[in-house]
Amino acid sequence: MQKLYCQVLLLSFFYASSLALTWSQDKEFNQAKNYEGSSNLVDLQYHMGPVLSSTINLYIIWYGHWNPKHQATIRDFIYSLSASSPYPSVADWWRTVRLYTDQTGSNITSNIVLSGEFYDSRYSHGGYLSRLAIQSIIKTAVTSHPRALPLNAHNGLYLVLTSSDVQVQDFCRAVCGFHYFTFPNIVGVTVPYAWVGYSGTQCPGMCAYPFAWPKYSGKPPPSTNGGNNIMKAPNGDPGADGMISVIAHELAEVSSNPLVNAWYAGDDPTAPQEIADLCLGVYGSGAGGGYVGEVSRDPWGNGYNVNGIKRRRFLVQWVWDPVKRRCFGPNAMD
């Protein structure tokens, strides 16, 4: 009975909080509190849990039917996290994430290795998924034969990406992605994981921002010159390029708070403010009120703030710097 009670309690916690990048019109466009400047209002605390300090073996699960070009964009971003690229680079952005430590003083790792991929093109759990079903997808990926992913309880991190035709509970309505940890009674072990959905067709204005604009924002896209032009995606697709920023957001948070007992602000662990939540909508200096901040543009008007491998460019959201006590990215102007 006690085991059952604990399981029900854990499931209740999961449904209440599975830590998510949430989209809110108020947050983005009206009264954004993104703390782009230094702030004493943020009470980010360490709660003594682990961070991902060992080499991260990242496993991608491609759920549904995927455009190979979009997959290549996402892979190159993952590779760029640990690769040398021109400044400001994706790896430079990750250095801010690396400032977070565990109770032994060990920093979050700089080494993220794409160690395996699984293609669930048969939609093993259907076209509509609950949040909890994401864990069942991981279970399928690590038990399918003959090409199962390893079940790596030591330093594995599982990234489930759903295609454009897959509906996920709360996707577009409330979340663009989330992270959590698996339950042993579903997957067999406890491992951190994240889910991000492709929003290019379902809700680009919500989850592919700023490459698409929310229909119900009530305001035109802000810009420095007073124009209303939507920023173009650096790799040619708003859905895939929008996913990159959400993936970055979730990777930063799952690395600094993998078991929901490490780094976050607020007194309620079921509704924490994690290191990327504090910088929602901030991509450059001067961001706020729906304006992403000062970012670079290529000759075709594509917006970006970091460089990656193969001359790729990406636009990723800033995260909270615990030393500077402000949102920060390598493209900061100060």
Image (cartoon, grey):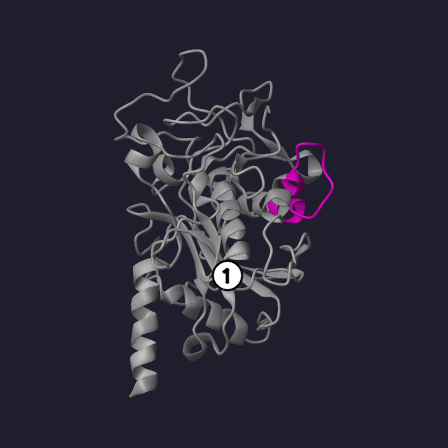
Asked where in the image residue 169 lies, by quadrant, the reply is: bottom left
On the question of residue 290 being in view, the answer is yes
Frontmost residue, 14 versus 132: 14
The residue lying furthest to the right in this view is: 84
Whether residue 229 sits left or right of residue 55 in the image: it is: left
Residue 72 x, y percent position in the rendering: 60, 46
State whether residue 144 is above or below residue 108: below
Frontmost residue, 327 versus 229: 327
State whether residue 301 is above or below residue 187: above
State whether residue 221 is above or below residue 149: above
Question: How many marks overall?
Answer: 1
On the question of residue 120 being in view, the answer is no
* Residue assigned mark 1: 258
State whether residue 219 is above or below residue 252: above
Q: Which residues are magenta?
A: 77-92
Frontmost residue, 91 versus 133: 91
Residue 135 x, y percent position in the rendering: 42, 68
Residue 238 x, y percent position in the rendering: 46, 35
Q: Quadrant of the C terminus?
A: top right
Frontmost residue, 332 versus 40: 40
Mark 1 is surrounded, within 10 Å at the Cα level, by few (under 14), some (14 to 19) or many (20 or more) other residues, namely many
